[in-house]
Each structure stands twice: as C-alpha cells, then as structure tokens.
Amino acid sequence: MATEHEKEAPPPPVDQLPAHGRLGRFREYVRRNPLLNTTWRIGVFTVGVTVLIGGLVMMVAPGPGILGIVVGLAILATEFAWAQRALHHAKKAAERAKEKALDPKAKRRNAILGVVVGILVGAAVVAYLMVYDFKLPWDIQDWTPWK
C-alpha cells in the first residue's frame, strides 16, 4: 500500500515480465536471439495490424468493429508499448461509454426517441404508398416493372 508521498510503480514493460510455462520459456529464447526477436515482432505487428484494419473496416461494414479494434490493439500490446497505451485509452473510453449508456435518463430518452422516429417513419411509408397508388400483390394485373 502506498502512502500519500509514495506513488505506485507502473507495471513493468512486457519484455521484463517473468516467463511462466513452456510458452514463456519459448518467448525468452526468442527474445535472446535478435533475428528471431525481430521476426517475432514483425509477425505480431502484421497480425495485429491486420486485425485492427479489419476492425476499422467493420466499423462501416457489417460486423463487430469495436471488438476487432480492441483485439487488434491487444495483439499489438503484447509487444509494443504504444499499443499498450492505446489499449488503455480505449478501455477507459469504453468504460465511459458504458456508464453513459447505463444512465437511466439517457436510456429513457433513447427509448422515447426510437418509438417516435419509428412512428414517423411508418407514417411516411404509409403516406408514400397511399399517394403513389398502393396496390397489394394479389391486385396487380400487369407484373412488368416498366410500362
């Protein structure tokens, strides 16, 4: 426990963490060999950036974009300090968003807005169909889309 004048030490860098198990011993072996270490880091960078870019693409395309970004940053954070900082900032932003989403006033407001917008869109669709000669499928005589 730290006193007021003492600050807690930041966590050690990834490359200074103790090795546990067979995977830890393998990683220590790779770190001791400069060529293997560089190759390992290039591989981690390639995989992490690929997943990160996939997450960014999924932000505009269907898919779990946020999850892809977080997983990509987590992969990169295993080897790079800048990715650890970015992942830390992303976790803090996600925590703030969660708190904001769980606010009862915001939930009630969003529910009311969703219902009102749904009713307005439904009314607009019905009005459009009434103005432009709404016909049910069984009442259509000519099925050709052009005339």
Image (tube, helix red, strand yellow):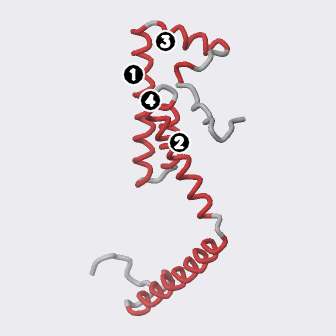
- Crowding at dot 4, Cα within 10 Å, few <14 / some 14-19 / many 20+, comes out as some
- Judge whether 116 appears above or below 45 on screen: below
Q: CA distance from mark 3 to mark 1?
A: 13 Å
Pointer 3 residue? 31
The spot of residue 10 in percent (x, y) is 57, 32
Q: CA distance from mark 4 to mark 1?
A: 9 Å
| Secondary element at image label 2 | helix
Please identify the quarter of the rendering in which residue 18 is found: top right
Front residue of 17/126: it is 17
Instruction: Name the quadrant of the C terminus.
Output: bottom left
Earlier residue among tags 3 and 4: 3
Q: Amino acid at mark 4?
A: Val
- Crowding at dot 1, Cα within 10 Å, few <14 / some 14-19 / many 20+, comes out as few
Pointer 4 residue? 47
Closest to the camera, between mark 4 and mark 1, is 1
- Judge whether 59 appears above or below 112 on screen: above
Earlier residue among tags 4 and 2: 4
Residue 42 marker: 1
